Amino acid sequence: MENPAGAQIDNELLARRGRAEGLGDVTGDLRLQIEDDIVGILHVENGTASIQPNGDATALIRFDTPDTLLAVLGGGMNSFVAYLQGRLRLEGDRALAIRVLFGLRAGSPWTDLAGVKPHGP
Amino acid sequence: MALDTVSILDGNKFVVSNRQGDIDATPTLPHGLFLDDTRFLSRWVLTVNGQRPVLLSIDDTSYDRVQFFLALATGTVYIDSQLSVIRKRTVGDGFHEELLLVNHGKAAAELKVRIEAAADFADLFEAKDKVRKKGELYCNVLAGDRVTFGYRRDNYWRETHVASTQPAELSEDGLLYQVNLGPKDSWKTELNIAAVMDPGHAIEKPMLKNVKASPRPELTEDLKHWIDDAPKVVTSWRPLEEIYRRSLIDLAALRFRKPVLLEAMPAAGLPWFMTIFGRDGILTSLQTLPFLPKLASTTLGTLGLLQSRSDDPFRDAEPGKIPHEVRFGEMTAFEETPHSPYYGTADATPLYLVLLEEYERWTGDRELVLSLENEARAAMRWIDKYGDRDGDGYIEYERRNPNGLENQCWKDSGDSIAFADGTLAPTPRATCELQGYAYDAKRRTARLAREVFKDSVWASELDRQASDLKQRFNQDFWLPDRKFYALALDGSKRRVDSLTSNIGHLLWSGIADEDKAAHCVTHLMSDALFSGWGVRTMGINEGSYNPIGYHVGTVWPHDNAIVVWGLRRYGYEAEAARLSYAMLEAAELFHYRLPEAFAGYNRDLTKYPVEYPTACSPQAWAAGAPLLLIRALLGLEAKDKQLIVNPALPKTIERLELLDVPGAWGRRDAFGRARVR
């Protein structure tokens, strides 16, 4: 599938792999999309997180814009708030998605990415 | 809920109206169609020829539907009304209403039937105030089809669609029908009010024609299955059978489903708490475990999923903490309130561990418990690291969000933790029952560590910590002059010396020394605490006592059920039977449904327990209270995959049977006869 939205941000996203303190007990693969465009596969294992261009996934996180994706992935935006605002939707293994999204608030390899702005109070 | 309102509900979807079926919301009248903490309809008022029909009777025997039997008044008792008006309403993702007019007269009638409609899209936190919305309210009329009320603020978008099977003049004010009704003739229309979240992504549902009169047969089937699956109560005291059935229905009605949650878990209470509360969900699950174990597994899974993984002062969250409250409305969406989720509770985390062990012991479901081992370890780390803020070995709380809850225990109103002279205790506050819960959590988790997680080192450490906590607690919290445990230690480690029902929770947890427990029982059954209907939250001689104070004198059914459980644990069978029966008598007088709380007036003042004005009803842990009382009366315990029965009934309940009790043993019957005097 084409990846035009992801192409704008994927270089930096894909280059990162690092510690995610809140994900020590979580393993899984989640597809990240901006609306219908695939950005990549978020792989979480042993307290580390990375994004790979392709692969299988059991959960899907669909964001409305690249800004929301970066803000949530970087832990700056509360994912539950993003969901309530209609900026984020979950499909598939929701439990995995919620664990990962909550865990990224405790620390994320993408925290200091350009474009990540702290959201909320 | 006030007696002049009628509510129907299905989880967090509910409609509150007056007794004619009209919705007419004001800051003091919480009327409306609510879904996900948002009011989708704030006005829905029926008039016929400019008159509001008067009430004849209400049929509300099912939790999700109601029928209003009305008539057009003639203004005098000497002239009979010729027009019946019947409104049948069912709640779902909105509500469905069938409106039937019957002309009993011999002459034709020309009628202007108007339904005024409006939607303010108030967040539930705004419903008590007249708040100016920050987004845009709008209304669209699609001629001949429907009226749409909408609200949009950035991506946050909600709509209410109103449609009718009969042609109506539609306007921004509602619907108008011109009805020519022949003699002995009738006229009917069906109205669909659909609450639509995020209309840009919602799948349009069929709105209009050929809507069936009973639109939700699956709910009837689900309720039948729910009741059939629960154990049966057979007793010589018939009101108990009615109370039990009412509780089962209310617990079914309060089940709450959301796409972000795994399965249905109980919402806390109508109308203000129709959402997930950690403490309420856990205590309700504990109360109902021998009857409805599915509630416990769902609660454990869902709260485990929402367990905090980060440090977040805005949400009063730290890693391992179990959430207090989850909200879905606009103010939460825009972080004007911290409920996404909010973690301002110090008791849900130890109580989560208590439920986890109780669940395993009753059901034998080790698979679920093993899957939650990480959550259990994180919860225990929270108790030791974050719960104990100053390293004194006790859990104490103090909010980090200045708009968060000042009291993060079950008595969470602002004036609940006070000295005997009425002075409020400074924070941080270490309330006594929190220490009991922590003690119980360590004892129980030690068993799980030993038998399920296979970590004997951790088990031994937890047992050692529990023993140490019990010893210190019995020194530091005991008031030797008053001979009961202090309500709390305040920020300066002073003992907060009010007599409260919290001492009953200490019996349940097992942290009280035997000799000190005996003194506590005397206090619990004394005139100061026991009103004759139940144990008050605070003794009548304390400075803050108020029989209609939310946590400083009222009687709470769930609190009493826990006290009864504690009395049984320490062997006080007669006291447990007496208190149980008093509470069940109160339930009978509340039409078999215990409210969240009722007034603490002495029983000799009234023949009936006096209502607390803003009590939620139904309330999950009030609905669960009779189930825990039944468990305590029969002395049910689970041990080594066997059901233990040790009944202690009051003489007024000569015989009590509980048939098909589910558990690790499969299904067993429990039977008791009155022996306690």
Image: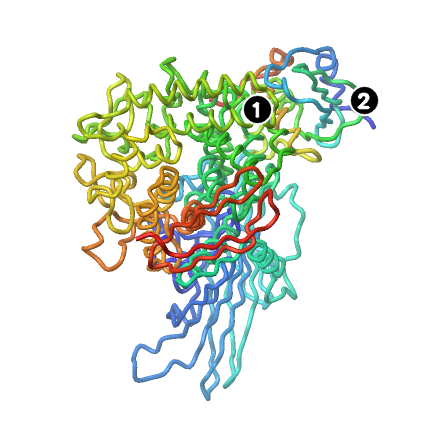
Residue type, label 1? Arg
- The residue that disc 2 covers is A54
Q: Residue at x 70, y 19 (%)?
A: A44
> In this orientation, does residue B511 appear?
yes
- Per the image, label 2 sits on a secondary structure element best described as loop
* On screen, residue B199 above or below B354: below
Q: Are marks 2 and 1 in contact (CB under 8 Å)?
A: no
Q: Residue at x 59, y 23 (%)?
A: B374
- The residue that disc 1 covers is B450
Closest to the observer, A47 or A115: A47
Residue B448 in percent (x, y) is at 56, 27
- Name of the residue lying farthest toward the right: A1
Closest to the observer, B642 or B14: B642
- The verdict on a common chain for dots 2 and 1 is no
> In this orientation, does residue B624 appear?
no
Residue B512 in percent (x, y) is at 33, 29
Which of the 4 image quarters holds residue A14?
top right
Residue type, label 2? Asn
Between circles 2 and 1, the one closer to the viewer is: 1
